[in-house]
Image: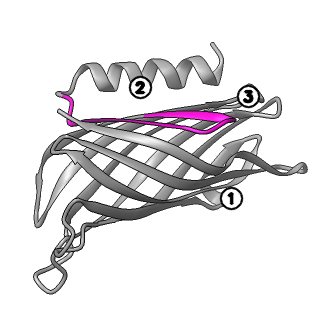
Amino acid sequence: MSLRHLVAASLCLASASAVAQSFDISLSNDAAMLTYMSPLGQQGFGHGQVEGSVLFNDNDDFLGDLGFGVVGAAGSGSPGLMVGVGAKLYGVSANNNDIAAIALGGRFDYAPPPLPRLRFGGEINLAPSIVTFIDGDRLSAVSVYLGYEIFQDAVAYLGYRNIKVNIQNGGDVTVDSGSYLGVKFKF
């Protein structure tokens, strides 16, 4: 069984056991990314969250991730700001190489109080060489977006994403880089 099939099966099992919180789809000319998020209960001042994503591009590269994190309000001095920290397990098949990585990351989402339907945010996940395996040496995934809440349960957005892996003795491979259009549905 290839890494691609293993990651896809894990994501299906994880999503089948949880009640849906949101489904996110983002598209560019070269890539598509699908993300499923579900709440996992109260964790102190934040809320636990589990998520799984798959990304594929026109180079036949594939990325899957499964993550856990805690997300909550940044504090009373920052109304509208949600922040989160967590970890993700990545599986990547790119340029005829298979990569597995454990990344730590953070995210933010801000809805300015005067314009509560406007959203902007971002996410960064990094895996140094000590936690990147098989053919990989490092992984970085960075994204930012600007969106608008069309309905209470739907946000349309424009964003920029850059996902790179470093191959042992092979240099950097860009899995995705560029702008995208997306919609996030809440259930």
Q: Is residue 107 visible?
A: no
Residue shown at 83%/49% (left/top)? 168
Say whether residue 19 is left or right of residue 32.
left
Magenta highlight range: 20-34
Q: Residues within 10 Å of mark 2 (few under 14, many from 20)?
A: many
Q: Nearer the viewer, mark 2 or mark 1?
A: 2
Q: Residue at x 11, y 67 (%)?
A: 45
- Residue in view at x 17 percent, y 75 percent: 114
> 10 Å neighbourhood of mark 3: few (<14), some, or many (≥20)?
few
Q: CA distance from mark 2 to mark 1?
A: 24 Å
Main SS, magenta region, reads: strand
Indicate the position of residue 61 as horizontal and vertical percent values. Answer: 71, 31
Q: Is residue 183 above or below residue 114?
A: above
Which x, y percent locates residue 147? Answer: 37, 55
| Residue type, label 1 | Ser
Find residue 120 and report its horizontal and vertical position in percent. 37, 64
| Quarter residue 25 falls in | top left
| Residue type at the position of mark 2 | Leu
The residue under label 1 is 129
Question: Which numbered tag is attached to residue 58?
Answer: 3
Look at the picture and state if 7 lies above or below 92: above
The reply to whether the magenta stretch includes residue 21 is yes
* Count of numbered circles on the image: 3
Q: Secondary structure at mark 2?
A: helix
In the rendered structure, which disc, 1 or 3, sits on the residue that comes first in sequence? 3
Label 1 – label 3 distance at C-alpha: 27 Å
**Residue annotated with mark 2:** 11
Residue drawn where x is 54% and y is 41% of the image: 90
